[in-house]
Amino acid sequence: MGDKDSRENCRLTIKELPEDERPRERLFKYGVQALKTSELLAIIIRVGNPQETAVQVAEKLLRKYDGDLKRMANETENQLCDGIKGLGKSKGAQIIAAFELGKRLAAFTGSERPQINTPRDAAQVCMSQMRYLNAEALHVLTLDTKNFLTKQRRIFDGSLNMSIVHPREIFKFALDELAASIVIVHNHPSGDPTPSNDDIKMTKQLVDAGKMLDIPVLDHIIIGDGRYVSLKEQGVIQ
């Protein structure tokens, strides 16, 4: 009992740092933009371990990922915490929640139901969710008669080709949502959104299926790292 109490009592906190080194006080004094990434993480982590402050724990976490926030943003709480003393599942959950808020802010359009009139509109809805994915995924956006987004759903994960991306699954979702039209969106984990021959072939088959069901495929957007390609603009969809 006494040993446990002594360990807890020696736990280092942000408050034990000199005031001009405390991340929260620096934020109040200089603004959030003045803080290093490790200091922002330390504000979320709050408490370190018996040997390290929260700032030091944050620095260790960043070193684990070579400072790559993109990699961190795609981890689970268990993956974040692995090998980092003082970083448990609860703190890991706080960090991934902060990343998710950032993604949602990047996708926020000011409207609960954005109108999809251009390739850029569709890319903006999906970019923050899909640009950092480590594997390919295919999303379907269902639209009403005025092109307002009614629903978005991830339909497939993994390497995409027509052997797994069957029109039946995509158009079942569209029919269930009473979609007037749909937009297909998938990502390239490489960051390069240039369409492959398989992407073009898949797009043409989905467009043909949409014509038979009277649910037009308005576009197929390929998401890269901050970039996108519209197969409508490329002339693949007429």
Image (tube, rainbow, N blue to C red):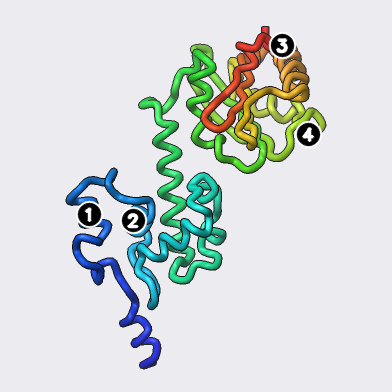
Foreground residue among 159 and 57: 57
Q: Is residue 160 above or below residue 16?
A: above
Q: Amino acid at mark 2?
A: Glu
Nearest to the observer: residue 133 or residue 38: 38
Q: Position of residue 78 (x, y in %)?
A: 55, 61
Find disc 2 in the rendering and name its residue: 39
Mark 3: which amino acid?
Lys
Whether the residues at callouts 2 and 1 have beta carbons within 8 Å, the answer is yes
- Identify the residue under disc 1: 26
Residue at position x 49%, y 67% in the image? 84
Describe residue 163's horizontal placement relative to residue 128 as left or right.
right
The span from disc 1 to disc 3 (Cα, nearest Å) is 59 Å
Image position of 129 with respect to 86: above or below: above
Residue type highlighted by circle 1: Arg
Near-viewer residue (210 or 238): 238
Which residue is label 3 attached to?
211
Instruction: Identify the mark nearer the N-term, 1 or 4.
Output: 1
Q: Earlier in the sequence, mark 3 or mark 2?
A: 2
